[in-house]
Amino acid sequence: MPPPLLPSLAAYGQPSRRGTQPPHHYSTRPDPSDPQENPLKTTRFLLRPTRNVGFLSQTFRATRLGDPKKYILKVGTDISQRRKWAKELHVFERELAAYRLLTPLKGKYSPRLFAGISANQGSDGLLFLEEIRNARNFDQLRGLSWRQLTSAIRAIAHIHAYFWNSPKLKKARGLPHHHYMRAREVKQNLPAFLRWAKLSTRDRSLFIKLTSQVPAILARFKKRPITLVHGDLRSDNVFYGERSVRFIDWGLSLAGSGTFDLARFAGGSPQKPLSLLQHVDLFNLWHRELLRRGVRNYPSHEAWQDYRDAILLALTIPVTNGPTLAMFSNRGHKLAKVITNRFIIAARVVNHE
């Protein structure tokens, strides 16, 4: 069977008021004033599924005759349970908001967005993106080297500095504030996680304390500086080129503390557990880049406390996601166990738990 053809993006109908519509029928509303979007209005694309299997979405490579460029089409998942989670997290609303905010950076740190829409309360949508070429990402099970960690932290710090306390964050439609993955749900998910994880008494106590720590951290973060946060910063979502680092999958983005990206990445993606000195080195690299790019009134001692708190927020990730991830495949089970262990180690090292 030949691959499907994507009709002209401008030809898609609007989502119905009830939020239901045929598969892959979305209005992209291209901006006629944007020279990048005009060429998409009357063109048909050939679609081929990518090898990457998204948890809350699916992606296709899109090509067209006479165009040497390659594109990625991202749409909602066909799996009903995952679509439900996507709706709860509003992933397409958040990703669309993030890509629109990132537009002035002209694809330096992320793929360019050419057209997009969110539908069904963010559970579904369409994103038509530039395909990142001559770069690769790495499996989170494998983890990243120190050099890869530092280059990504430097790049994400540039994004954080650019959006530091920016008024654009409040105006960004669909971008939540201080929604760090599912940290708010740690208490309700903890019993099932503890049954699944089979932890030692010492490790169980670490997670039990989260039920009182997390609300206090979230309340404190509301009084701290905010920026555009990727929200799901891990090795799978980072593409390394010869002289570039770019970030994909912004579906869990938010306005909040940039230290969450740092903690999520340093806690969940290294090949080997980081020592306290290495955590400090990564933190200092991130903080220096902020200062070099104009961030003021954010002293190191306050930023370090934010990082320590963010490490504890990152510890909620295995609680809320681990058992579900483990159900889907052997790889998912391995990954759930690996990230649980990595985040436990990070919390003990940084917070002396």
Image (cartoon, rainbow, N blue to C red):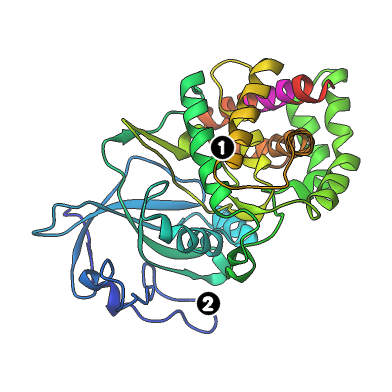
Image coordinates of residue 251 in percent, x first then y, are 53, 54
Who is closer to the viewer here, 352 or 89? 352
Measured as percent of width and height from the top left, residue 172 is found at 58, 68
Question: Answer yes or no: do the residues labelled 1 and 2 have beta carbons within 8 Å?
Answer: no
Identify the magenta region: 339-346
What amino acid type is highlighted by mark number 2? Gly
The quarter of the displayed image where residue 265 is located: top right
Q: Is residue 4 left or right of residue 288?
A: left
Residue 115: x percent and y percent? Answer: 36, 67
**As rendered, which of 92 and 163 lies closer to the eye?**
163
Q: Residue at x 56, y 27 (%)?
A: 269
Q: Residues within 10 Å of mark 2 (few under 14, many from 20)?
A: few
Q: Which residue is at 45% across, 79% downward? A: 15
**Residue lying at the far bottom of the rendered structure:** 17
- The answer to whether residue 276 is above or below residue 162 is above
Residue at the limit of the structure toward the left, as seen here: 66
Q: Is residue 34 left or right of residue 219?
A: left
Quadrant position of the C terminus in the picture: top right
Q: Secondary structure at mark 1?
A: helix
Q: How would you classify the magenta stretch by its main secondary structure?
A: helix
Q: Is residue 136 visible from the viewing direction of this image?
A: yes
Residue at image point 38% right, 47% down: 108
Please tell me whether residue 342 belongs to the stretch shown in magenta: yes
The image's mark for residue 19 is 2
Q: Amino acid at mark 1?
A: Glu
- Give the CA separation, mark 1 to mark 2: 43 Å
Q: Tell which tag, 1 or 2, sits nearer the viewer.
A: 1
- Along the line of sight, which residue is nearer the eye, 188 or 97? 97
- Graded by Cα atoms within 10 Å as few (under 14), some (14 to 19) or many (20 or more), the crowding at tag 1 reads many
Q: Secondary structure at mark 2?
A: loop
Is residue 140 visible in the rendered image? The answer is no
| Tag of residue 289 | 1
